[in-house]
Image (cartoon, rainbow, N blue to C red):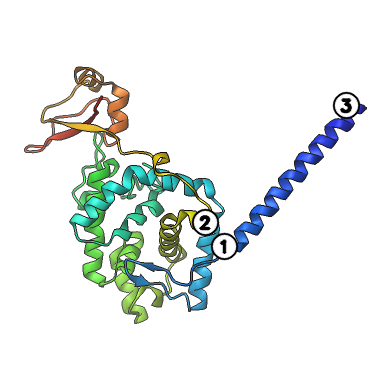
Amino acid sequence: MKKFVLTFVVLSFLFSISVLKAQNYFTYLSSLKLPAQLDFCGEKVPLDIPEVRERAEREFYLLLQQPGQVILYIKRSGRYFPMFEKIIKEKNMPDDLKYLSVAESALYMSRSSKGAVGLWQFMPATARAYRLQVDDYVDERRHPEKSTEAACKYLKDGYQQHKSWLLSAAGYNMGNTNVSSHLDYQNGNGFFDLFLNEETSRYILRIVVIKEIMSNPEKYGFRIDNNEKYKPDNVKYIECNEEIPNLSKWASEQGTTYKDIKILNPWILERKLPKPSKGDVYKIAVPVK
């Protein structure tokens, strides 16, 4: 009986502590407010419009309820943002575009239920239209640099069509043709003039909120040192214009392992590679040791 009472007291104490922590967290969360101003690629989000503010707050508080996910966003940004920033800058495009990849894939080599793949979540047909190889052996949607180049081309095409990076980002989600159709039908001039499907309406404000929190992590309670962020892989590239019938054997010949090759080259799908198309070469990353 004494043992039962002691157990009950301990559990009650632990429950009280957990309730107190939860109350403290909810108090802290409710103290956080959406900033008075938000923008994306220099385009202002009209938070003075009540329904826009409400939609933005929805994304703001829902994301802050996922602190583990935000921490992973920040840690993974150390691996991919330097490369994104370099390519985006070379193309003279706004740096904010890198946050699309966070919204698309959480900076993870993911596959959606609809079949979109990679950091930028390309569907097969769109990937091929933007000159990414997608077949049984190679899927360049999973190639960090090449998929980023293709995403920039898609976004630049959208900007040239709509003259707005917000509309270009919307086109990345729902297609540039659909965006144009809505602009024409609704006599709209910008993204926030349009009544769109819930997915695209949320998508844009989610990107804006991701940018705000990742740009100001300490403001929202996230304290992650730069040395805690995941680092870009230290690699060199070996060019190959021949078939690789046994990738494990090839890896050994390069002084590395099959596991390293597969991790560093997620675009390689199988245990072998056919001869590349005429004039092409494979650039295979291997670790520098």
Instruction: Say left or right for 76 vs 157.
Output: right
In this view, the mark in front (1 or 3) = 1
Give the residue at x 16% y 34%: 282
Q: Position of residue 42 (x, y in %)?
A: 32, 69
Counting residues from the start of the chain, the first of labels 1 and 3 encountered is 3
Counting residues from the start of the chain, the first of labels 1 and 2 encountered is 1
157 above or below 190?
above
**Quadrant of residue 72 within the rendered picture:** top left
Q: Marks 1 and 2, how far apart in space?
A: 7 Å
185 above or below 197?
below
Cβ atoms at labels 1 and 2 below 8 Å apart: yes
Q: Marks 1 and 3, how far apart in space?
A: 44 Å
The amino acid type found where label 3 is placed reads Lys
Residue 220's disc number? 2
| Disc 1: which residue | 32
The amino acid type found where label 2 is placed reads Tyr
Quarter of the image with the C terminus is: top left
Q: Marks 2 and 3, how far apart in space?
A: 44 Å
Instruction: Give whichever of 242, 177 is nearer the camera.
Output: 242
